[in-house]
Amino acid sequence: MKKFYVDTNIWPDFALNRRDSIRPLGELAFSFFRKVVRKKWQILYSNFVVGELEQHLKPWEMQERCFGIVSDKGLLFKVALSTEQSFEAERVSKKFGVPFGDAIHAIIARDSKAVVVSRDRHFQTLHEIVTTFLPEEI
């Protein structure tokens, strides 16, 4: 069974049907989630994702517009962050010059044996720690 840790930037793309100047980001995210549901793959998230999403979305939007597509199918799983992972993320953040949150996501995904789905370029720097794909690459 495949597992994906969906980075914070993908959820609002999907929930708000966002676009950039050339791509329909919401549609690309929707296609990814539709494939997850069809193949019965797992989606992982953490409290850190929830905290970041709270900056963009209301709680009901997170549940209904974001997580609902996979939680209704029993494919959404919350992963806890340990103290050791937090300390390691601090070291990784400094070593690779990436935001602490990206280091957290990478470490949680690695330890959960999951692939990160993200548009954040910082994950290219973290390729030694975790494999990352764009939603449309899955």
Image (cartoon, grey):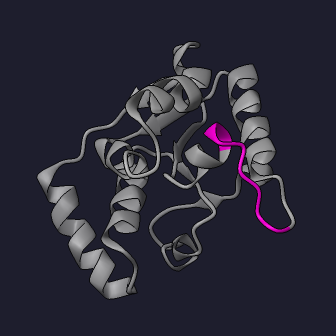
How many numbered discs?
0
Location of residue 115 in the rendering, given as x and y in whole percent from the top left corner: 56, 50
- Residue 27 falls in image quadrant: top right
List the single residue furthest toward the front.
Answer: 58
Relative to 49, 66 lies left or right: right
From what the image shows, is residue 126 above or below residue 131? below
Location of residue 62 in the rendering, given as x and y in whole percent from the top left corner: 47, 33
List the single residue furthest toward the right.
Answer: 22
Residue 20 magenta: yes
Location of residue 81 in the rendering, given as x and y in whole percent from the top left corner: 23, 46
List the single residue furthest toward the left.
Answer: 83
Q: Residue at x 33, y 37 (%)?
A: 79
Seen from the viewer's position, the closer of residues 2 and 82 is: 82
Location of residue 23 in the rendering, given as x and y in whole percent from the top left corner: 84, 60
On the rendered image, what quadrant is the N terminus found in?
Answer: top right
Relative to 95, 9 lies left or right: right
Q: Residue at x 62, y 23 (%)?
A: 69
Relative to 68, 29 lies left or right: right
Region in magenta: 14-21
Seen from the viewer's position, the closer of residues 89 and 130 is: 89
From what the image shows, is residue 120 above or below residue 118? below
Q: Residue at x 18, y 48 (%)?
A: 82
Predominant secondary structure in magenta?
loop
Q: Residue at x 76, y 31 (%)?
A: 35
Residue 9 magenta: no
